[in-house]
Amino acid sequence: MTHALPLIAPVESAAVTSRPLLSVVSTLYRSESFLEEFVARVSENARLVAEDYEIILVNDGSPDGSLSFALSLARRDPHLVIIDLSRNFGHHAAILAGLAATSGERVFYLDSDLEESPELLPLFWEEMNREALDVVYGRHPQTEGTQFRKVTSNAFWFIFNALSDTPVERNLCHVRLMSRDYVNVLNNMPERSLFLGGLYAWPGFRQKAMSIERKLRRAQSTYDTWKRIGLMTRSIIAFSTRPLEALFLVGALMAALSFVAAGAMIALRIFSSETVMSGFTALIVSIWFLSGVLLAGMGVLGLYIAHIYVEVKARPRVIVRAVHRFGSAPATTSEPAPVKP
């Protein structure tokens, strides 16, 4: 049966009489070629920890046959729930839409490209039980990729953690097992401009990273250089006001230096017979320098104003076109429980 949702998301769901122990969430974008293996391996590992489980797949406007293939799998497996977004809203927004649709006591997220193994679920489950944790997440031991990517990635994490009040561990992965309380907090965060690395870290709770091996990527990454630069910029703007503080300090320092320089030139003119430095070149250099500082400052202010503009519009992060469920498993669209103070 197919349920059309006229409401915009993040997905909010109706009350349920039965709550599964485990919800598994993943997103679909050009995932058709490895979706069947993904569902089979996730189901196998989910049964190792919980007989009562659901698998929520969020179609993020995938241009291939991911949606139709996922629907064919859902017709044969009552544990599958397919959430079809009205268009591509981006990876991070789709992840949060999936988390908002969960009702399990624990929620496991991993990407469907099998870069991280579904076999991590039992390991994370055991670690969460042993140490009474709220979150167990994966972390790659080192940055992989080209030398350029390694340098830029390390530079980004250094700059982000230097500027942000919310430190984020380097090389973290999206794959993670989360408690219901933690997921409820994520579901109640209203941000539209998303950086999940920061959102994952900000609530606190008892979190632990586990070093995992990165598998060979099955599909080409959809994050090009410009998307990565945009994500880096948004993440710093969303989690730090220190660029504004630095801009103020630079302006104050330049004003102070200009007063000192003006005083020195006046003193030289009055008390010294030497000619005060002048010349077209010095003037042009000064103009270019000040213009650069002003333009950079306007750019920083513009980024923050744009961030505010996006937030105050309060548009939904995603729009859900339909939710597809063909089995008799418990409904998954349940109102998130109140956040504990």
Image (spheres, helix red, strand yellow):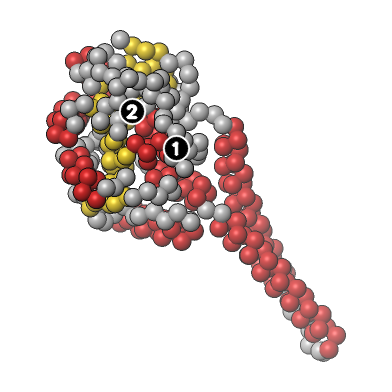
Q: Quadrant of residue 174?
A: top left
Residue at the (41%, 60%) spot, across then down: 158
Q: Position of residue 36 (x, y in %)?
A: 18, 25
- The residue positioned 68% from the left and 66% from the top of the image is 252
* Residue type (three-letter) at the residue carrying disc 2: Ser
Query: Residue 297: horizontal and vertical position, in percent?
Result: 63, 55
Q: Nearer the viewer, residue 23 or 138?
A: 23
Q: Earlier in the sequence, mark 2 or mark 1?
A: 2
Q: Residue 42, which numbered label? A: none
Label 1 SS: loop
Decide: is 65 above or below 338: above
Locate the N terminus and report the quarter of the image it occupies. top left
Name the image quarter holding residue 17: top left
Q: Position of residue 84 (x, y in %)?
A: 36, 21
Q: Is residue 301 left or right of residue 203?
A: right
Label placed on residue 339: 1
Residue 103 is labelled as 2
Vertical order, 4 against 88 (above or below): above
Q: Identify which residue, 201 or 321, lies in the foreground.
A: 201
Q: Which three-letter amino acid code belongs to the residue tagged 1? A: Val
Q: Residues within 10 Å of mark 2 (few under 14, many from 20)?
A: many
What residue is rendered at 31% in x and 40% in y?
Answer: 178
